Image (cartoon, rainbow, N blue to C red):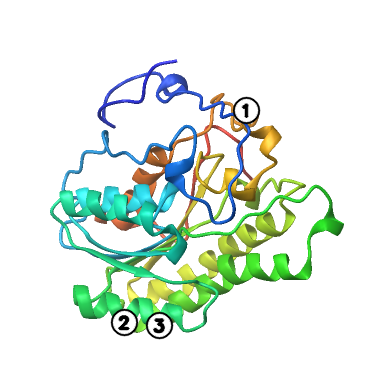
Amino acid sequence: MSAAPSDQYAFGDPRSRYPDVSPEPQTQEEPGLQSQMTPVPDLGESSYRGTGRLEGRKAVITGADSGIGAAVAIAFAREGADVVLAYLPEEQSDADHVIEQVEAAGRKAVAVPGDLRDKAYAGQLVERAVAELGGIDALVSVAGKQRWQPDLLDITDDQFEATFDVNVFGLFRLVKAALPHLQPGSTITTTASMEAYKPAPDRLDYAASKGAINNFSKGLSQLLVERGIRVNVVAPGPTWSVLQPSGGVDPESLPEFGSSESPMGRAAQPAEQAPAYVFLASQESSYVVGETLNVNGGMVTP
């Protein structure tokens, strides 16, 4: 397998564009830290090259400390956007790395740690964005909760409620808080999953929440297009992030993570997901509304 590309525009075989991670079994307490993973996910620090596609934009990104959310924050900054980063306080050390990357791109980084389960947090997040950036015109929801359980009887009411509170209700509250500040031309991009179509039997609550996000976003897109606001969805396939070693999947399954599911023969890196979010927030996708963009290495969807 080849090393990760030094430039995202470099031509090459997609099957070997990034190495197959084949991680050893490893565990962390939820929510986990990306910096303690082996190997550490690639956020595009060395490869993402912006071309001004989001120049002057003002973005709020949840889950921006690590994984896909962090890769999106870096990509947005390198495309010219200022960024408000939302993440759990326990993830501060990972967030500090992303903040450094955003500022190195010459853009403003506003850190607003908090918990999406806190009903007041969405409003506080939006208030900080408006105060610090002067507004919002790109809302990107990536943060998510995922816990594997081998049997339905192992899923407690508390776990089921927490999964939906973060993944679905947190998104609902965030959209409601942001909507009064979104002008025509603004975008909302949410994050579903391949599991919205092909639910993993040991992640039933997570898969169900991702199906709800997909459905909610499509309905929302029809409601908000009349205001000139575009809503779209990214549905990643298996992507190496801190969700996996912090209880998202069976630790013993990690050596085969992604390689047995995706026709591409490997898991994605967060850096490979970020361009989809850039496209959906940019004016290049001005006629794209209510779309679910599947970035899953060839896993067929309905």
* Disc 3: which residue: 123
Residue 298 placement, left or right of 84: right
Position above or below: 242 against 216: above
* Disc 1: which residue: 255
The residues tagged by marks 3 and 1 sit, at their Cα atoms, a distance apart of 41 Å
| Disc 3 and disc 2 in contact, CB within 8 angstroms | yes
Q: Which amino acid does label 3 sit on?
A: Gly
* Residue located at (64% from left, 59% from top): 211
Q: Which amino acid does label 2 sit on?
A: Glu
* Disc 2: which residue: 127
Residue 175 in the image: state x and y as whole percent. 44, 75
Q: Earlier in the sequence, mark 3 or mark 1?
A: 3
Q: In which quarter of the image is the C terminus?
A: top right
Which residue is nearer to you in this view: 253 or 170? 253
Q: Earlier in the sequence, mark 1 or mark 2?
A: 2
Which structural element holds mark 1? helix
